[in-house]
Image (cartoon, rainbow, N blue to C red):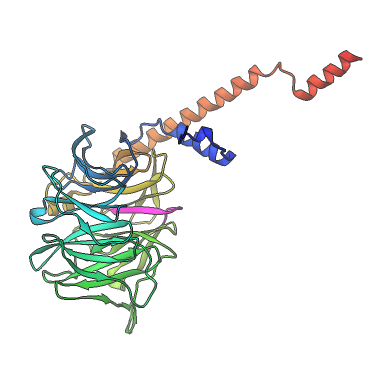
Amino acid sequence: MQTANPDYYFQSDAANANRARKAAKSGNKNGNPISMKSKILAAIPDPADPAGSIFIAESAGFCRRINLESAQTKTTYKGPKAPVTCLSIGGTSNKTLYAGSWDKDIWSWDLDTAQPGRKFSGHSDFVKTVICGTLSGNPILISGGADKKIIVWDAKSGRRIHTLQDPATTMLAVQHLAVDPVLSEADSLVLVSASSDPSIRRWRVSLASAEQLPEAYHGRPDAERLTVQEHETSVYRLVFDMEAGSDADLWTASADGTAKCLARARSFEAEDSLAHGDYVRAVVVTPRWAVTAGRDEDVKVWDRASGALYATLAGHFEEITDLVLLSPGGGAAEQQQQSSSAAARVCSVSIDGTIRTWPLAQAALDETVRKIKEDADRAAAGKTEEVTKDEDAGAGVLTAEEEAELAELMDD
């Protein structure tokens, strides 16, 4: 008989302790958890309901549209037989859901009907990131994979337009992609890529051509660097700050345990660094807060003005894989204006299979932190009481040495 139950295998003391810790932590209700049946590997906002729904990618091969208020699945998108790692929405009229998978393909569905669409095949390893865009009025798809390639696709025909690789340096698995909202134009996009090495690369892409862009050093117009290197190791996430009045600085999340703000005015040199403490998988920002999450299972909220850690939101019991900023507004401009309002929230998803939602309005955030601390103190007190009872119950029991001593006396 074969089984995945760890109780049937040799386990180190550390592994057993960690498993017991996660089992004890899994029952908490922090963040109003919605439980799914498999690991959640990615999430994106629902453009039709940015305040109340998200799309998730699961290790079981499904994509789902989840209503956060009812905790119900609104739509399920089926097809892949391997884990789905990334999601994006685009295509004609932004009505197509795209998903990259471990099966090396990119799948697509009609957003509303869940009918399967075109499948894009071209990567030779896992697809790890996918984004949508438009070039000269034509919808395009851009994907990055563990095969170290970035592929630009014609979304209508499925034709490969460009394949991008860094010719001068060792570019490892592509982890994330983002489109620069300031430098991109109708006929050309400036693409930013992150990979399993510390380098962040920039590319200019049009229908006719593609080139890697060098980055000038701040204050040294005569010098250029081929890549932006502000981290010590893998970069997992790229997010442009799109809040009204911002310079669209680039926020990054890295395996070196930090999230950083790379200032556009300083040629993308690090201006702020947040020491999350373990692999940082995701970062989102509002005018007041920066929110980070990753392998240490906690969502951390930072005050952008001071750079200080404001709150730690404990709830997940496995690595957090993604964050989604939920906005009360309907349109993009309205979302930007209201993202710091009382109704703004952040949603976290995890390998533990749960979706959790956290408030970002200060009063509600403070109340959430207070409740988490109360619950933790209550749990610790209960554990102490249980230990005390066990000690009391054993007060009249002899130790092994005392029993041996007693046996010797009785023999005498």
Whether residue 247 can be seen here: no
Question: Is 237 contained in the magenta span?
Answer: no
Q: Find the magenta span and give its range.
A: 275-285
Q: Vertical placement of 344 versus 387: above or below?
A: below
* x 31%, y 67%: residue: 263
Q: How many marks?
A: 0
Q: Vertical placement of 48 versus 206: above or below?
A: above
Residue 149 appears left or right of 390: left
- The picture places residue 377, in percent across and down from the top left corner, at 47, 31
- The picture places residue 77, in percent across and down from the top left corner, at 20, 43
Whether residue 101 can be seen here: yes
Q: Vertical placement of 368 versus 400: above or below?
A: below
* Quadrant in the picture for the C terminus: top right
Q: Nearer the viewer, residue 386 or 65?
A: 65
Residue sitting farthest toward the bottom: 222
Residue 52 sits in quarter: top left
Residue sitting farthest toward the front: 1
Residue sitting farthest toward the right: 412
User: Could you tell me what secondary structure mostly forms the magenta stretch?
Assistant: strand
Q: Vertical placement of 180 versus 130: above or below?
A: below
Residue 407 appears left or right of 376: right
- The picture places residue 246, in percent across and down from the top left corner, at 22, 62
- The picture places residue 27, in percent across and down from the top left corner, at 40, 30
Question: Is 278 contained in the magenta span?
Answer: yes
Residue 170 sits in quarter: bottom left
Residue sitting farthest toward the top: 410
